[in-house]
């Protein structure tokens, strides 16, 4: 690739299968101006509410925002929220051919109530038990049939039960048979099950939780030791450890480094990991250098932190920052 323009243009030719836990993010925003007489809690005067595609569906939104084509593969409930989820998909012009409606689950919904961007409470409605056999077979059937259309698989695991060891193992096997790269954003339950993937992206909190370790990510030696433990437990071609406001660490076994975060007016870090895995996954499909991939993802993750709630990347903002970035310029 000779320019950022060429890279972004090449994204348009890619189709991505996003496998994982989907949800509805429901936001209620207002102002808390007094304390209730009924209980010592704030009274919020509602000013705005909205529902967005969340979880793995936010990854799909990021993929689409970058110009590529996402196909979501997941299980939702056969309930009113499941209908709402499919309505949101339709509204966003995204296909529902990988979505399974199950009578054995509820559709995950997260209600967040805020006042002037300050979170007051979150209410979750969800099932986190593993899929029953019938739903698992349906999910794997969809994955197998949809893989032929795809250039990349992203596992977006929120520990809600859609993904289990059997789904992971069979999907990885099928993807490898078709030479399709695999990127993973894991959680504790299946943390070490993603063996042999192309990119294993994890944040510091999930790394500590997944391996039951403690370390100071700001200490270079401790971070390197944690990365070594990760590599000893999970076989992957490449590893990203996102460090929130402290940047991103990358490692391929033969190449490693730490990238600083860019100065931002942070509003909320919600959804930044979804953006990082989306950008880095698409870069995988183009065979871009690891440091380039890490820095582009690092920039994108920072940009979405300047927005309230989980939102997909603004491609134009990313383009403007990317074309002036000195690290990226080294490779163009």
Image (cartoon, rainbow, N blue to C red):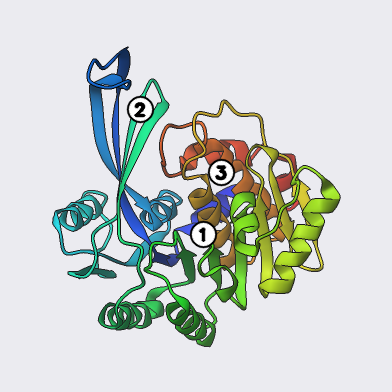
Residue linked to disc 1:
10
In the rendered structure, the answer to whether residue 216 lies left or right of residue 239 reads right
Residue at x 50% of width, y 82% of height? 169
In the rendered structure, the answer to whether residue 190 lies left or right of residue 118 reads right
The mark lying in front, picked from 1 and 3, is 3
Residue that extends furthest to the top in the rendered view of this protein: 33
Residue at x 43% of width, y 66% of height? 16
Label 2: which secondary element: strand
The mark lying in front, picked from 2 and 3, is 2
Task: Identify the mark at residue 301; answer none if there is no mark.
Answer: 3
Distance from the alpha carbon under mark 2 to that under mark 3:
22 Å
**Relative image position of residue 276 (x, y in whole percent):** 55, 51
Distance from the alpha carbon under mark 1 to that under mark 3:
20 Å
**Relative image position of residue 285 (x, y in whole percent):** 56, 67
Residue that extends furthest to the right in the rendered view of this protein: 221
Vertical side of 322 occupied by 22: above or below? below
Task: Identify the mark at residue 114; answer none if there is no mark.
Answer: 2
Marks 2 & 3, CB-CB < 8 Å contact: no
Residue at x 70% of width, y 39% of height? 246
**Relative image position of residue 143 (x, y in whole percent):** 36, 78
Query: Which residue occupies the foreground of this view, 155 or 16?
Result: 155
In the rendered structure, the answer to whether residue 92 lies left or right of residue 83 reads right
Residue 3 appears in the rendering: no
């Amino acid at each position: 690739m000779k320019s950022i323009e060429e890279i972004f243009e090449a994204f348009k030719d890619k189709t991505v299968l996003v496998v994982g836990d989907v949800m509805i993010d429901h936001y209620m925003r207002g102002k808390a101006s007094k304390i209730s007489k009924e209980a010592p809690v704030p009274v919020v005067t509602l000013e705005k509410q909205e529902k967005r595609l969340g979880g793995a569906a936010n990854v799909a939104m990021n993929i689409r925002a970058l110009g590529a084509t996402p196909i979501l593969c997941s299980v939702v409930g056969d309930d009113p929220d499941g209908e709402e989820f499919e309505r949101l998909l339709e509204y966003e012009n995204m296909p529902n051919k990988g979505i399974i409606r199950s009578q054995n689950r509820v559709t995950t919904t997260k209600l967040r109530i805020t006042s002037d961007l300050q979170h007051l409470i979150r209410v979750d409605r969800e099932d986190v038990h593993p899929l029953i056999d019938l739903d698992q077979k349906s999910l794997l059937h969809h994955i197998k049939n949809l893989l032929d259309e795809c250039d990349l698989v992203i596992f977006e695991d929120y520990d809600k039960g859609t993904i289990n060891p059997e789904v992971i193992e069979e999907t990885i096997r099928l993807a490898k048979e078709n030479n399709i790269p695999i990127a993973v954003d894991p959680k504790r339950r299946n943390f070490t099950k993603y063996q042999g993937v192309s990119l294993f992206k994890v944040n510091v909190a999930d790394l500590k939780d997944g391996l039951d370790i403690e370390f100071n990510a700001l200490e270079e030696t401790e971070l390197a030791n944690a990365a070594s433990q990760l590599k000893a437990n999970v076989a992957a071609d490449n590893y990203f450890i996102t460090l929130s406001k402290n940047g991103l660490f990358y490692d391929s076994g033969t190449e490693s480094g730490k990238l600083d975060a860019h100065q931002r007016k942070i509003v909320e870090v919600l959804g930044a990991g979804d953006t990082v895995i989306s950008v880095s996954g698409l870069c995988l499909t183009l065979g871009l250098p690891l440091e380039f991939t890490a820095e582009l993802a690092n920039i994108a993750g920072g940009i979405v932190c300047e927005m309230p709630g989980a939102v997909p990347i603004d491609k134009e903002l990313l383009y403007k920052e990317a074309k002036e970035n000195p690290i990226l310029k080294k490779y163009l």
